[in-house]
């Protein structure tokens, strides 16, 4: 769908994007992650052709990105805004027309959306008379009204109460089911695993990580397990075997003990269990799977260490 | 192109539909009509005040018939005694009634008494003095045996008929006062409207920026399209307003003139009944020339080439508007609020302000001088300078060259402004310096 190759964007005093390459597969939800100021907005602006990169290229459906693709992209910027004095319906139609829709089509689709989100009564209200949350809803409709193939959402849930956030999330998933590719940019990790098929992590102008969520989690599998057994904590000598694993932490509660072990490289869980089987009565084994949040924190703090 | 049309449409319609647009469109002509009426009223009033009625008590006997009423003084030969007349002076409501007492030995000893209820008006006194000395002079000439009529023939008034020689060698009547009036009106009109519509462009851009809608829009259209759409849309609002003003002014002037003329006629009748017959005619004449326009003035007004002026007005107003609104657009894109904008609007409007100020002096007094000619070629000053010169007659080639330079200037400023604009609209939070603006200008797109 979208292929970003070696993008460099230099502003006078800092480099916003440094040789960033990404691949956004068709029909997926792509999470663009990174802390504030990492370069996400710069990249999004380049995809929207608001600014041009200094070097590198972008392919949209295997064609170099050009102005003909503008109508195929819908963009919800992080900083929302509409003409305050303009009426809701009129403004929506105007924005859709700027995206190349005819007036009739815009009206028709607007009716569909207003009915769907139950906001039909807002048609003749001025934007400034709506609450902040209502304005956000209107702006979401404006983003998707022209049925873009690629929808770019920059922090789409900020400013929504939980109920409306859920409504919007459902709409996003439905649009995705209907075939739209979605780039979801955020620095909040909670929703990422729930929504995204693929992610890319940008930090300090550089891409530090990308791939499908599953693969990344596999890749960042920490080889760490929790092992519960019955009985008191045994002495380290008895349990420990540095060639197989290290005990990172342990807790004891009455007659129950929990160990947190990290396997040594190239050791399988079976080998470790085999070593422990005749020593303790295992009740439960659980793999500790890192969340995207943990990976994010780890990656960001890593790169800040190397930069410092 | 289709998108620019959409933007123009929005910019135009949202402004034209505003209540403030209707208000200014209807109130401004009313204001001008009000001013017009006010001027007539004040002129009339000052005329009434300087006009004096003088009762003559002529003890000499031969002087009073020779004192002919003038535009400013109505002489009335009184047959009453001085005391009696003095009492009427006190009764008289009009403050500018006075009594002139001419003694018996006036011709040998030219001293007269002038009695007025208030402080005697100096100009009235001077006029009486000169009228009386004329009479004494004529009397003395007569005594010396000089024929007065032939003497009057010697006094010749030289009339200057200012004629302009056109390029074809034709002559035409020129009237400097009318040209000056038109030049002044054009200068004020262009100055005010360039400011008015230029700052509307700026405000519109600041609004889009502070609303944060700008990012949504420029993900659909190019920044240049948005900027030009706004400039053209607001320019059309300006033109609409001009056209409406002209139409409304004519309509209101028509209504007002029929109303006021009939009233003035009524006033004349009242005044005429009070005065001697010979005077009412003069009053009517002078009053008439205040309200209406004398035939000579009509001829001169008709000699003014209105088509040329209107065509030039549209060319130079539009050119100037495009130049300055582009600059205003650049300023609007660079700042976050209107208060921040003033540090930039001052320098860019400096040439405009300078030309405006000069138009009352150098440009008007010497419309074909070096300063005026140069200013009418420089694109930043020509919208005012050329329009001030046009009513005085400007060679066609100068107008054409100036208009071409104006177009070149507009292309140049738009290019510069667009480069600053595309960067500025995405910049928030920091107050830009000139150095910063230069940096933005140099950015690759």
Image: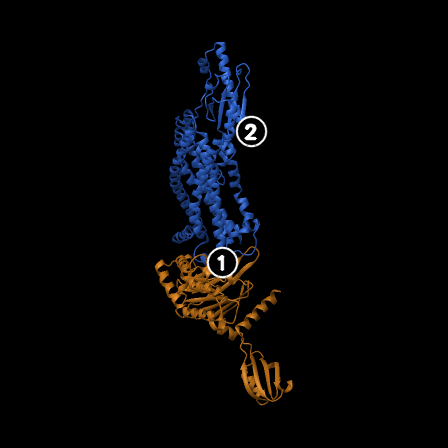
- Neighbourhood count class around disc 2 (C-alpha, 10 Å): few under 14, some 14–19, many 20 upward: few
State which chain disc 1 sits on: B
Image hue for chain B: blue
Is residue B213 visible from the viewing direction of this image?
yes
What residue is shown with label 1?
B212
Q: Residue at x 42, y 38 (%)?
A: B312
Residue B64 locus on image (x, y percent): 47, 19
Position above or below: B199 against A300: above
Image hue for chain A: orange
Residue B392 locus on image (x, y percent): 45, 32
What residue is shown with label 2?
B119
Q: Nearer the viewer, residue A304 or B352?
A: B352
Residue B251, picture quadrant: top left
**Sequence-wise, which precedes: disc 1 or disc 2?**
2
Q: Secondary structure at mark 1?
A: loop
Position above or below: A29 against B428: below
Residue B214 locus on image (x, y percent): 47, 56
Position above or below: B430 against B50: below
Q: Nearer the viewer, residue A25 or B34?
A: B34
Residue B436 locus on image (x, y percent): 56, 51
Is residue A53 visible from the viewing direction of this image?
no
Q: Are marks 1 and 2 in contact (CB under 8 Å)?
A: no
- Neighbourhood count class around disc 1 (C-alpha, 10 Å): few under 14, some 14–19, many 20 upward: many
Residue B217, picture quadrant: bottom left
Q: Nearer the viewer, residue A276 or B29?
A: B29
Could you say which disc has been placed on residue B42 in the image?
none
Q: CA–CA distance between discs 1 and 2?
A: 70 Å
């Amino acid at each position: 769908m979208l292929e970003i190759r070696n993008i460099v964007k230099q502003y006078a005093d800092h480099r916003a994007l440094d040789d960033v390459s990404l691949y956004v597969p068709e029909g997926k939800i792509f999470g663009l992650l990174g802390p504030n100021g990492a370069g996400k907005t710069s990249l999004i602006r380049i995809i929207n052709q608001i600014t041009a990169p200094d070097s590198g290229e972008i392919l949209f459906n295997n064609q170099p990105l050009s102005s003909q693709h503008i109508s195929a992209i819908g963009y919800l910027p992080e900083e929302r805004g509409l003409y305050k004095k303009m009426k809701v319906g009129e403004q929506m139609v105007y924005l859709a027309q700027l995206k190349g829709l005819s007036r009739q089509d815009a009206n028709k689709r607007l009716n569909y959306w207003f009915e769907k989100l139950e906001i039909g009564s807002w048609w003749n209200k001025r934007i400034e008379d709506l609450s902040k949350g209502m304005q956000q809803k209107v702006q979401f409709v404006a983003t998707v009204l022209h049925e873009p193939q690629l929808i770019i959402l920059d922090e789409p849930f900020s400013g929504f109460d939980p109920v409306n956030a859920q409504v919007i999330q459902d709409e996003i998933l439905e649009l995705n089911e209907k075939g739209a590719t979605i780039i979801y940019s955020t620095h909040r990790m909670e929703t990422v695993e729930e929504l995204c098929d693929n992610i890319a992590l940008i930090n300090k102008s550089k891409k530090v990580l990308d791939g499908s969520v599953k693969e990344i989690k596999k890749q960042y599998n920490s080889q760490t397990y929790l092992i519960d057994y019955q009985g008191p904590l045994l002495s380290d000598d008895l349990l420990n075997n540095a060639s197989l694993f290290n005990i990172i932490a342990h807790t004891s509660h009455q007659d129950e003990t929990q160990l947190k072990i990290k396997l040594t490289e190239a050791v399988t869980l079976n080998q470790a269990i085999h070593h422990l089987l005749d020593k303790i009565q295992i009740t439960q084994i659980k793999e500790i799977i890192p969340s995207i949040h943990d990976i994010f924190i780890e990656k960001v703090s890593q790169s800040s260490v190397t930069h410092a | 192109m289709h998108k620019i049309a959409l933007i123009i449409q929005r910019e135009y319609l949202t402004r034209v539909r505003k209540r403030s647009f209707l208000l200014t469109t209807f109130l401004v002509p009313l204001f001008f009509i009000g001013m017009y009426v006010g001027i007539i009223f004040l002129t009339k009033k000052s005329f009434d005040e300087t006009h004096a009625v003088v009762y003559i008590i002529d003890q000499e006997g031969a002087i009073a018939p020779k004192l002919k009423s003038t535009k400013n003084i109505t002489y009335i030969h009184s047959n009453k005694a001085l005391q009696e007349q003095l009492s009427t002076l006190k009764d008289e409501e009009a403050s500018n009634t006075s009594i002139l007492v001419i003694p018996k030995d006036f011709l040998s000893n030219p001293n007269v008494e002038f009695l007025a209820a208030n402080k005697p008006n100096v100009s009235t006194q001077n006029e009486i003095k000169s009228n009386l000395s004329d009479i004494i002079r004529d009397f003395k000439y007569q005594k010396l045996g000089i024929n007065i009529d032939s003497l009057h023939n010697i006094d010749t008034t030289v009339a200057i008929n200012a004629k302009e020689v056109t390029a074809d060698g034709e002559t035409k009547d020129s009237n400097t006062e009318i040209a000056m009036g038109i030049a002044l009106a054009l200068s004020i009109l262009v100055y005010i409207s360039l400011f008015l519509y230029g700052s509307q462009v700026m405000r519109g851009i600041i609004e889009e920026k502070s609303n944060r809608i700008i990012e949504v829009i420029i993900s659909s259209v190019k920044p240049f399209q948005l900027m030009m759409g706004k400039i053209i849309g607001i320019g059309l609002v300006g033109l609409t307003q001009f056209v409406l003003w002209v139409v409304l002014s004519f309509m209101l002037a028509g209504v007002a003139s029929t109303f006021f003329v009939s009233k003035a006629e009524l006033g004349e009748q009242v005044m005429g009944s009070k005065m001697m017959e010979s005077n009412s005619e003069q009053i009517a004449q002078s009053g008439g020339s205040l309200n209406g326009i004398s035939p000579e003035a009509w001829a001169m007004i008709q000699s003014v080439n209105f088509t040329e002026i209107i065509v030039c007005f549209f060319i130079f107003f539009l050119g100037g508007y495009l130049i300055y609104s582009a600059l205003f657009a650049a300023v609007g894109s660079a700042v976050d609020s209107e208060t921040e904008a003033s540090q930039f609007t001052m320098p860019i409007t400096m040439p405009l302000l300078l030309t405006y100020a000069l138009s009352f002096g150098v440009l008007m007094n010497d419309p074909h001088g070096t300063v005026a000619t140069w200013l009418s070629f420089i694109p930043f000053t020509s919208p005012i300078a050329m329009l001030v010169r046009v009513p005085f007659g400007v060679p066609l080639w100068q107008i054409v060259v100036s208009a071409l330079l104006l177009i070149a200037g507009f292309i140049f400023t738009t290019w510069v402004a667009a480069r600053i604009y595309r960067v500025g609209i995405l910049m928030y939070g920091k107050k830009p310096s000139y150095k910063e603006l230069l940096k933005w200008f140099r950015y690759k797109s």
